[in-house]
Amino acid sequence: MPRAVLFLAGKVFTQYRRAGGSRTGVLPDFFIGAHAAVAQLPLLTRDVRRSRTYFPSLKLIAPTM
């Protein structure tokens, strides 16, 4: 994994925890978001709010239900 991705994922995960985030299975989501941000790729997600909060520069693709 590129060092820039690891750094960004760790940084936003720390923000999440400091903001009171307590869910335990979210670290992989931060790795995926960081990959998309570093590679400047769009991200397909159903969790638009969290993605927009921690990766504001990402173009998001959100399926409508």
Image: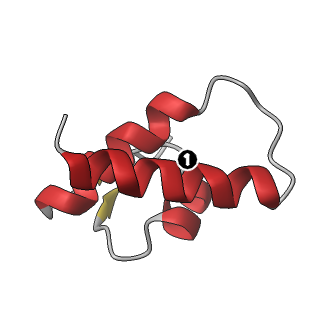
Q: What residue type is labelled 1?
A: Asp
Residue reaching furthest top?
25
Q: Where is residue 28 in the image (x, y as percent from the top left)?
A: 46, 29
Q: In the rendered image, which residue does mark 1 sit on?
A: 47
50 or 44: nearer the eye? 50
> Which residue sits furthest bottom?
57
Q: Which residue is drawn at 33% across and 51% down?
A: 34
Q: Which of 4 and 50 is in front in this view?
A: 4
The answer to whether residue 2 of the structure is visible from this angle is: yes
Closest to the observer: 37 or 60? 37
How is the rendered protein coloured? secondary structure
Image quadrant containing the N terminus? top left
At x 80% / y 47%, what residue is drawn? Answer: 21
Query: Percent position (x, y) of residue 22?
Result: 83, 37
Up/down of 41 relative to 46, above or below? below
Left or right: 14 in relation to 36: right
Quadrant of the rendered image containing residue 39: bottom left
* Label 1 packing within 10 angstroms: few (<14), some (14-19), many (20+): few
Of 44 and 5, nearer the camera is: 5
Q: Is residue 25 above or below residue 18?
A: above
- Residue 44 shows up from this direction: no
Residue lying at 61% horizontally and 61% vertically, measured from the top left: 49
- Taking 22 as reference, is 24 left or right? left
> Where is residue 23 shown, x and y percent of the image?
77, 31
Q: In which quarter of the image is residue 12?
A: bottom right
Q: Assign a secondary structure to mark 1.
A: loop
